[in-house]
Image: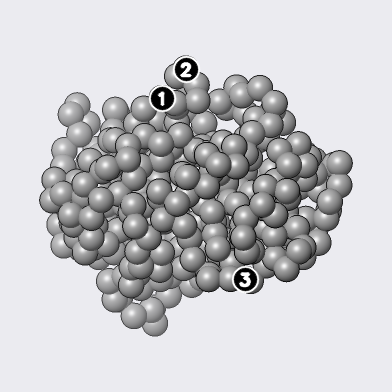
Amino acid sequence: MARKLASIQKVKALSAIEGADAIETATVLGWQVVTKKNEFNVGDLCVYCEIDSHLPEKPEFEFLRPRKFVIKTVRLRGQISQGICFPLSILPSDTPLEEGLDVTEVLEITKYEPPLSAGLGGQTKGYFPGFMPKTDETRVQVLEDVLEQHRNKIFYVSEKVDGASMTCYLKEGEFGVCSRSLELVESTDSLYWVCARKLNLENKLKSLSGDFAFQGELAGEKIQSNRLKLKGLHFFVFNIFNIKEYRYLNYQEFRDTANQLGLETVPIVEENFLLTTEITVNYLVNYSINKSLLNTQAWREGIVLRPLIEAKDNYLGRLSFKAINPEYLLKHGE
C-alpha cells in the first residue's frame, strides 16, 4: 500500500498551546500538528504533509530550506508537531477538493530516505522477489478507522528495533538474502550476507519442512548509527513466512519456531494486548515512548502491533501497524 505523503484532510480539532500566542495545535487524522493561530478552523480542509516528506525546491516551500525541505518531527513551545498543514491554495486550481485525496504527485513530493551506512548493501542481484511480501508497516496515526474495525482483538506488541530491514529465504533449494527492496549478491562486502553466514541462516531454513523466509532487523556495529550501542551483528527476527502457502506464521508458531532454531527475535513488549475502546491513536503513541529493552539507556524506535492469530484488513492487507516513539524521532532529527 503506497503511503500518502501529502493528502487533503480535515482539521478535526484545535487546541491552545500554553504560553503561545501565535501558534496552536491542530489534529489531522491522528497527528498533532502545530499551525499558525487562526489559520484554520475546525472542519476546514487542508493539505497535510506527513513526516518524511521531501518537498520540491519551489518558492512556496522556500521557508523549509534550513530543514533541507524535509518534514521532520519537531517540538515547538513544548508541543510535539508531526507534519505540516498548508492551505488548499497551494494546489493547482483544477484539483478536486476531496477529503482523503492523495496529492503527493501533484505537489512533486517524494519520501525522504536517509543514506544507508557505507558498505551495508553490497552488490545488487535484482529487485526484491515477488513470491513473498516486503517488510513494511503503516503508522497508527492514519489508522483510526482500522482500530475501530478490530476492537476486542488480542494483539502482541513487539519493539521496533532501530536497524536495517533484512530478509533471508529458501525457495526450491535456493538461498537468498535481501534488503528492504533489493536482493543482494553474496559478498564479504555485504553486512547482510556476513550476518546470514555468521548465524547459519541457510541451514536453519533448510531444517524446516518447505520453503520459508525469515524477516527481521539487522542491527549492531556498522549498521546505520548503531543507536542501541549493540556489540557485533544481530538479526532480530519479527516474521517467519511460509512461501508455498503464502502466509505468515501465527504468533505462537513464530515463537516456537524461533526458539527451536535458536533465532533471536525482536523484544516482545506485551503478549496479550486487548484492543479495547480505550486504546486510541494517542494512547498507542504514548505507549511507544519508552526505552529499548535492548539498551535501557536508549530510546526505542517504537512498537509494532500484530494479532496473535494472523488477520486481514481491507485497508492494510495484513493486519499489522506501528507507533513510532516521538522522543526517538526528536533525538535523532527525524
- The answer to whether residue 88 is visible is no
Front residue (pair 45, 308) = 308
> Can you give x and y, in whole percent of width and height, for residue 14 in the image?
17, 48
Residue labelled with disc 3: 131
Q: Could you give the CA–CA distance between mark 3 and mark 1, rounded to whole angstroms? A: 36 Å
Asked if residue 264 lies left or right of residue 233, the reply is left
Provide the residue designation for mark 1. Answer: 291
Q: Residues within 10 Å of mark 3 (few under 14, many from 20)?
A: few
Which residue is label 2 attached to? 297
Of badges 2 and 3, the one in the foreground is 3
**Percent coordinates x, y for residue 187 in the rendering:** 86, 47
Q: Relative to residue 328, is residue 202 drawn left or right?
A: right
Instruction: Work out whether residue 120 or residue 212 is closer to the camera in this orientation and state it.
Output: 212
Left of 292 or right of it: where is 9? left
In the image, what residue type sits under mark 3?
A: Phe
**Residue that sits furthest to the top in the current view:** 297
Q: Disc 2 marks which amino acid?
A: Gln
Marked residue nearer the N-terminal end (1 or 2): 1
**Residues at badges 1 and 2 in contact (C-beta under 8 Å)?**
yes
- 142 with respect to 233 (left or right): left
- The answer to which image quadrant residue 292 occupies is top left
Say which quarter of the image contains residue 176: bottom right
Disc 2, SS: loop
Mark 1 Cα within 10 Å, few/some/many (few <14, many 20+)?
A: some
Q: CA distance from mark 2 to mark 3?
A: 39 Å
**Which residue sits at x=19%, y=26%?**
19
Q: Earlier in the sequence, mark 3 or mark 1?
A: 3
Q: Please provide percent x and percent y for residue 46.
A: 29, 62
Scheme by which the image is coloured: one colour
Of residue 230 and residue 112, the one placed in the foreground of this image is 230
Say above or below: 27 vs 183: above
